[in-house]
Amino acid sequence: MRREEPTVGSPSLVVYGAGGFAREVAWLAESCPDAGPVVAMIDDDPERHGSVVNGVPVFGLDAARAAFPAARMAIGIGSPQHRETMAARAAEAGFAFATLVHPRVECSRWIELGEGVVICAGNILTTNIRIGRQVQINLACTIGHDVVIGDFVTLAPGVNLSGRVHIGARAYIGTNASIINGEPDRPLVIGDDAVVGAAACVTRDVPPGTTVVGVPAKSRG
């Protein structure tokens, strides 16, 4: 597909990252009418500067800011902790953040989204859901009622969150993991910096910083 050149005054987007998920974010942006064209990808490795990824040139952070001062940023880094660090660096450089929601996301109007959220195709979000800053929701997840997702959380493809689940900051929920519902007066809580392994089934709270795996999910080690 031919990449259109931005016109003067048109919105444009840079993607922090130049790896696999960054390429997916750049592709996602093409489907978002308000995103604008992706004009640059950013990599912290100087050896990659000047290369081209899927038709998009790769810059360092400061060089991208100088070349595209009006561009907004989306972060294409799956690691919650690395994404938090990169968001701080990008904000310090002066970038504002775009929120990208693929047109093939189904959701009610009772959804709150923080800045920099990325929601890929095929997701279903029901009602009364709060999503914090720089959250990434990968392909084909389902998110039930009264879910709260903290800043910098990553949901890998195929995650299923039942109703009344609260996920703390920087948690990582692995591919095809399922989390059962909480109760009206007691949500099921995944703590800050917790990791839920791929295909795990979470039936109880996960303490902060803990990795759980299996069915039912238990602490690893």
Image: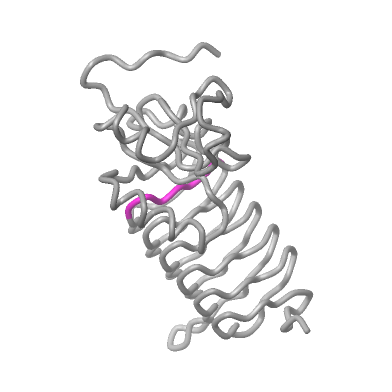
149 sits to left or right of 21 = left
Q: Quadrant of residue 10?
A: top left
- Figure label count: 0
- Which residue is found at the position 50% from the left and 33% from the top? 26
Q: Is residue 177 left or right of residue 184?
A: right
Q: Position of residue 144 (x, y in %)?
A: 51, 64
Q: Residue at x 57, y 43 (%)?
A: 122
Q: In front here: 153 or 127?
A: 153
Q: Is residue 74 left or right of residue 180?
A: left
Q: Is residue 81 above or below residue 120?
A: below
154 or 43: nearer the eye? 43
Is-magenta flag for residue 53? Answer: no
Quadrant in the picture for the N terminus: top right
- What segment is highlighted magenta in the picture? 115-121
Q: Position of residue 21 (x, y in %)?
A: 59, 42
Q: Position of residue 195 (x, y in %)?
A: 63, 71
Q: Residue furthest left?
A: 9
185 versus 19 height, above or below: below
Residue in the picture at 28% in, 14% down: 7
In this view of the protein, which residue sits in the foreground, 113 or 164? 113
- Figure check: 191 above or below 26: below
The answer to which of 77 and 191 lies nearer the viewer is 77
Taken as a whole, is the magenta stretch helix, strand or loop?
A: loop
Q: Which part of the image, by quadrant, shows the C terminus?
A: bottom right
Q: In the image, what residue occupies the spot 28% across and 52% down?
A: 92
> From this viewpoint, which residue is outermost toward the bottom?
185
Whether 116 is among the magenta residues is yes
How is the model colour-coded?
Answer: one colour
Percent across and percent down for residue 214 are 78, 74
